[in-house]
Amino acid sequence: MKLGLQIPDLTWPKGASSLGADLAAVARKADEAGFDSVALMDHFFQISVVGPPENDMIEAYTALGFLAAHTERAKLLTVVTGVHYREPGLLAKAITTLDVLSGGRAILGIGAGWNEEESRGLGFPFPSTAERFERLEETLRYIRQMWSDDDGPFQGKHYQADRLMNVPQALSKPHPPIMIGGSGEKKTLRFVAKYGDMCNLFDGPDLERKLDVLKQHCENEGRDYAEITKTVYHTFDIGPKGEKTGELNDALGKLAELGVDVAIGSIPGLPDLDLVEKIGAEVIPVAEKL
């Protein structure tokens, strides 16, 4: 099993004046410690499960480009982009740019989106749930075409384009992996089976059932379930002094038994670099053997 670090909380003690240096240091340490990926949320306001909306939040793709310059091997992604935040052509160019400039380390993390408060707050359209899922499927088709040899037009219900040219193309082959976030059994997991390379689920009591649903969708779509990288969000809480390290290792072992390939999560206590280093020394080697 591999571990990916997500950094959702950027309200750190030294404030915005030190945020660039602190974020670079965390990402660099995660890269050195053996984390397979470094991820940010794609939000404009902080989400309620992390803190109040007024807490610090930075734009994801600008920040991932910054992190590309401060890391060498870790993959870079959002967990995950809401489909209504960017037109698909812009999103495809952003991921392609990240992939080219990072040496082939970009992943597209995408989902139907949900945060109405920040969308209304900044004046972004917030379509109905049904329309956001329509846009998600069209965006997946659109971006996959941009990452192919077909630079012809695109005609959809919500998006139309004359020429899906993408130069330079991404370095990752056949294209940057597409991770679809969400656990909806009728649409989201079907989209994973049809268009995705990775899923992203939450670690909850229904996780095993969600994986079974994904497996059934793969059978229906004629897709090999083993081709899908199964990622699960799980917080890496080892305690302030590492006293919970054993509990985390046990939890990761249970995820591995279900067939989970990658655990992605935050580390409570950042930007404390000692916590990142301790996970690199005492958790990642254990996970890699699972």
Image (cartoon, helix red, strand yellow):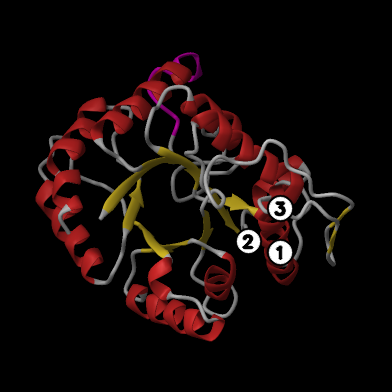
Proximity of marks 1 and 2: CB atoms separated by less than 8 Å: yes
Q: Earlier in the sequence, mark 2 or mark 3?
A: 2
9 or 40, nearer to the observer: 40
Q: Residue at x 23, y 64 (%)?
A: 256
**Quarter that holds the C terminus:** bottom left
**Secondary structure mostly taken by the magenta-highlighted segment of the chain:** loop
Amino acid carrying mark 1 in the image: Arg
Is residue 217 visible in this depiction of the protein? yes
Name the side, left or right, on which 167 lies relative to 72. Answer: right
The answer to which quarter of the image holds residue 10 is: top left
Mark 1 vs mark 2, CA separation in Å: 6 Å
Mark 3 vs mark 1, CA separation in Å: 27 Å
Proximity of marks 3 and 1: CB atoms separated by less than 8 Å: no
Q: What residue span does the magenta drawing correspond to?
A: 10-18
Q: Position of residue 234 (x, y in %)?
A: 32, 55
Q: Which mark is residue 149?
A: 3
Q: Earlier in the sequence, mark 1 or mark 2?
A: 2
Query: Which residue matches tag 2?
Result: 112
